[in-house]
Image (cartoon, rainbow, N blue to C red):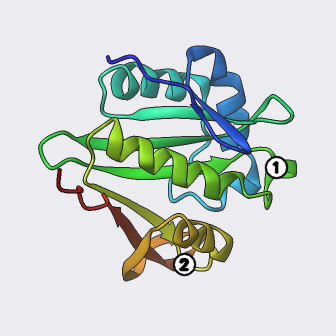
Amino acid sequence: MQHLPIITGEKVVLRPITDADTDRIVAWRNTPSVMQNFIFRQKFTPEMHRDWLATKVAAGRVVQYIIEDKAAGRAVGSVYFRDVDPVNHSAEYGIFIGEESARGKGFGTETARLFTAFGFAQLGLHRISLRLLAGNEPARRSYENAGFAVEGVFRDMVLLDGQYRDVVFMARLAPPQKEK
């Protein structure tokens, strides 16, 4: 596994996840306000997270970071690339702000900009895609502000809480390389 850098922005510091973050991640993922925006809604356990770290993160299929509020010096969420595909230079983006008091402060948008720039420059990605549940307008605006564009809507794609929900697919492509 390559050495991953700490990424610093104006509002956030992004650092690679460690096993010490397990309890925090599990608590956040089981918070109803976080869970409602995930397609995967099973109760999240420490064992599931440690398995994710061992089989996905350690294997390089996932690159996951903790989002810290730079001013407060505290962890507020997580961001990751999953299904990292070295052949097609692509990955799927995911993020959540676990601390309710940290939402709506621009941390997610800055994180999306910083992390996608890192994905293009350091990880050699060409395409970064994401999925979000239709109706999650704050997330959609944040993604658009970070350069993602809607590619399509898959109607009634998932059955959640007894209702079919549309899933919006968005992506961002690496900026064109400047000629030398």
| Residue located at (33% from left, 47% from top) | 120
Task: Examine the rendering and report whether any part of residue 41 can be seen.
Answer: no
Residue appearing at x 71%, y 29% in the figure: 24
Residue 26 horizontal/vertical position (percent)? 66, 32
- Disc 2 versus disc 1: distance between alpha carbons? 22 Å
Identify the residue position indicated by label 2 in the image. 134
State whether residue 38 appears in this view. yes
The image quadrant that residue 45 belongs to is top right
Measuring 77% from the left and 35% from the top, which residue is drawn there? 70
Q: Residue at x 40, y 18 (%)?
A: 54
| Residue 102 at x, y percent in the picture | 82, 49
Q: Earlier in the sequence, mark 2 or mark 1?
A: 1
Tell me the element at label 1: helix
What is the quadrant of the N terminus in the image? top left
Crowd around label 1: few <14 · some 14–19 · many ≥20 (10 Å):
some
SS assignment at label 2: loop
| Disc 2 versus disc 1: nearer the observer | 1
